[in-house]
Image: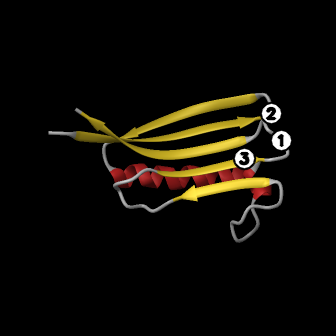
Amino acid sequence: MKNAIYLVTLDWAFDDEHGLEIYPFREYDAAYDKFKELIEHEIKTSWLEEAMDEDGNPNDGYDICVDDNNSGNSDVYFYATDDTHIGRYTNIELQKKEIL
């Protein structure tokens, strides 16, 4: 029988700093809540605040890609990059990992 865990990762870089945070969960709903919490936090407290307009669309010079189908069966992600400053990015993912 296969079991699964859900990993939420936050991979970020800002100028000369970078980091990787990993959050494991047994249940999809808890992982999805963390995924959404991380996105909201990053938008409010990081360089992403300047990257998006009030409707959540990317401003000129920024690239934002989101796949948030919340199906429980496929990975979801939020990727953002600053096209004018290669040292800035934020990648947030929720991945389902099978355990054999």
Colouring used for the render:
secondary structure
Residue 12 falls left or right of residue 58:
left
Q: Which mark's residue is nearer the viewer, 3 or 2?
A: 3
Q: CA distance from mark 3 to mark 1?
A: 8 Å
Mark 2 highlights which residue?
15
Residue 73 falls left or right of residue 48:
left
Discs 1, 2 touching: Cβ within 8 Å: yes
x, y percent for residue 61: 83, 54
Q: Residue at x 51, y 46 (%)?
A: 93
Q: Which mark is residue 96?
A: none
x, y percent for residue 45: 71, 49
Specify the amino acid type for callout 2.
Asp
Eyeballing the image, is 17 above or below 95? above
Specify the amino acid type for callout 3.
Thr
Q: Residue at x 38, y 51 (%)?
A: 30
Point out the tag, 3 or 2, that comes first from the N-terminus: 2
Residue 46 visible in the shown view: no
Residue 17 falls left or right of residue 9:
right
